[in-house]
Amino acid sequence: MKGYAILVTNDHLYWQSPRKVNAIDKDFHIHEGHVLTGVCAWSEEASTGTTSGREEPIYFERSYPLKWQPYLTLGTKKNEVFQVLIVEVD
């Protein structure tokens, strides 16, 4: 059985590589070219306020390469470009 995770957004911060290399949430980033695989967990530097209720790591049995694609362009201003991320999950 297959399923799909689909995200449509006009927030470029989702698909662009982050500026901060060692962010406390780096395992959870979904930017273009990132691969979700293995264990996703908060950095040890993350505060309890950040991780409260979300302490358990997420384990991926497979690798999921992330490939964003153009979806809709309404103009050239900020937030007028939409991208879509479709990840096949089985």
Image (cartoon, grey):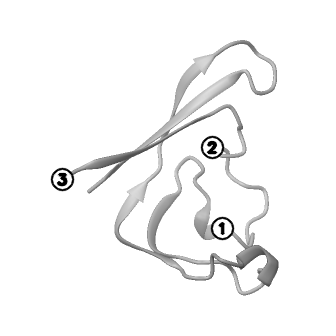
Q: Point out the tag, 2 or 1, that comes first from the N-terminus.
A: 2
Q: Which residue is mark 2?
A: 15
* Residue 60, percent from left and from top: 39, 71
Q: Which residue is mark 1?
A: 26
Q: Is residue 6 left or right of residue 20?
A: left
Query: Dot 1: few (<14), some (14–19), or many (≥20) neighbours within 10 Å?
Result: some
Kindly indicate whether the residue at mark 1 contacts the one at mark 3 (C-beta within 8 angstroms).
no
Q: Which mark is residue 1?
A: 3
In what element is the residue under mark 3?
Answer: loop
Query: Dot 3: few (<14), some (14–19), or many (≥20) neighbours within 10 Å?
Result: few
Q: Point out the tag, 2 or 3, that comes first from the N-terminus.
A: 3
Mark 3 vs mark 1: give the one in front.
Answer: 3
Q: Is residue 62 left or right of residue 13?
A: left
Taking the spot 62% from the left edge, 27% from the top edge, the residue there is: 82
Taking the spot 77% from the left edge, 80% from the top edge, the residue there is: 46
Query: Which three-letter amino acid code belongs to the residue tagged 3?
Result: Met
**Where the C terminus falls, by quadrant?**
bottom left
Point out the residue furthest to the left here: 1
Query: Which three-letter amino acid code belongs to the residue tagged 1?
Result: Lys
Name the foreground residue: 32 vs 2: 2
Query: Which three-letter amino acid code belongs to the residue tagged 2?
Result: Trp
Q: Mark 2 and mark 1: span between their CA atoms?
A: 13 Å
Residue 81 occupies quadrant: top right
